[in-house]
Image (spheres, rainbow, N blue to C red):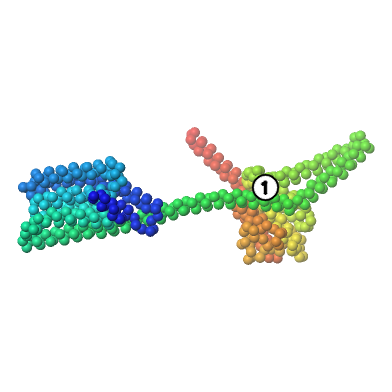
Amino acid sequence: MLFSTIMSLPGVFDPVDDPSFSERSRLRFLAEGRRKVLSSFKVLALFSCIVFPLFGILDYFEYPAFFSRFLNLRFICVGFMLITLFVCFKTRFGRRSFRAFTIIFPLIPAFFVSMMIYISGDPHTTYYIGMILCLNVIGFTCHWSFSEALISSTMVLLLYFVAITPPIFNGLDTRGKVLLLSNCFFAFSFGLTVALGALIQQRVCRDEFLSREKVRKQKIDLGAKNSELAKTMRELHQTEGELIQSEKMASMGQLSAGVIHEIGNPLNYSNQALFLLRKLLRDHNDDGNVKEVIGDIQDSFDRMKTIVTDLREFSHKSLETRMEFAVIDSVKVAMKMLGKEISDSGVNVQVELDPDLRIEAVKNQITQVFVNLIHNALQAICSNPPIGREAAIRIIGHQSGAFLEVSVIDNGPGIPQEIIKQLFDPFFTTKKAGDGTGLGLSICFRIIESHGGEIAVKSEPGVFTKFTMKIHSAQNRHHTLTNRQIEDNVSHEHAIS
């Protein structure tokens, strides 16, 4: 009857009655509360089973005539409490209805204390404090909801009022009435405090859980966003590689006329040499001119082979591995590819690079940077040739600490200051629609940045434009390695000595 009454009350077993709780959050909140309640309830209940008989000392001093009877009641109470604990923790019904047992358990000692008060016949006894004490301690330990605290407090007060009813009907003096009224008021106030404290504690626990739920959801969302960001970054890197390869293919298309020109000249010369060779073979059996013509043919074929090799290295993505090479080698390859465009434009291209200036980088990527920079310079000069001076492009470089600084300078129309900051933005171009993709300088920036370097531009409209790239020097790297080897050798010698 008691179980059915308690379990039918709303809010007893499901203290979460808040629209901010989702079903999943509600279940997590209840599971968390169950773990807290059961762990603390077991410890406190076992402690009560030990302490309750020890309070028999109070019986000896307060009611010596009832000492033995009260001691028997205390041990019987402990027996009932142990049985309640066993049912709660060892049976399926108890584990499922554990909230009911947290209400029933404090009523057991309260019932036996009320029996002692009834037997003593003392309406203003101080034993009611023991009833309220177990109610207060267990109530806050078991995290009662407001309805659970209200039920328990009401039941304890009813037991107390039933226990003091007979003495009241037997008559009380004025002092007894005052004491009884004071005890009742104190008991009622204590019960009300327990109920209000449970209500506040319930709200605090709910708010704290909601805060943790919010943090947990934010962490989950952040993890999902991080995963999405990592995926986006991988896709961006892949797209970047594809853009670089596409730009190289676009450059190859732009340079096809120059390549045909470079290969066509050696082929024409080889054809003429072969014609002369046939004629000499008919007229002379052995002539030094024949060997010279054969040598010319071999040189022409070697030149074509070099051009084909440079093109393959430039366009082949699988060859993108870092290697040490002279910067001037990349410049020469770029100029070979732009040979037709350079010769048609009439621009004087001057290469002032020391062959000893070496870097460790992906050669065809550095070549692509030079192709883009020289090609842009040629187009700028051809679109607006300098007046009163020779159209020229200078490629210079020098060692600057741990870096090499290589510059491509042209005396073309220059670049307006207001657009210099946008030059390296993807798809930004000042050319007409269809004349450029706007990716050339952006890809140059990304290539130099991926090598740990920098690229900058300086320009004075109508005077010059200067693109300067800084990239780690291979000489500096070797110097650092040499110093490290010397230090290792010195350390080794000290260790031996």
Query: At which x and y percent is residue 413?
Result: 71, 64
Residue 240 appears left or right of 433: left
314 up-or-down from 495: above or below: below
Residue at position x 91%, y 37% in the image: 281
Query: At which x and y percent is residue 485?
Result: 55, 40
Q: Secondary structure at mark 1?
A: helix
Looking at the picture, tell me which residue is in the foreground, 42 or 429. Answer: 42
Query: At which x and y percent is residue 344?
Result: 79, 56
- Report which residue position mark 1 lands on: 364
The type of residue carrying mark 1 is: Asn
Q: Quadrant of residue 271?
A: top right
Q: Is residue 80 visible?
A: yes
Looking at the picture, tell me which residue is in the foreground, 300 or 235. Answer: 235
Residue 446 appears left or right of 123: right
Q: Quadrant of residue 410?
A: bottom right
Looking at the picture, tell me which residue is in the foreground, 87 or 59. Answer: 87
Residue at position x 36%, y 58% in the image: 18
Q: Is residue 143 visible?
A: no
Within-10-Å neighbours for mark 1: few <14, some 14–19, many 20+: many
480 up-or-down from 378: above or below: above
Q: Residue most toward the right? A: 283
Q: Quadrant of residue 49?
A: top left
Residue at position x 20%, y 50% in the image: 107
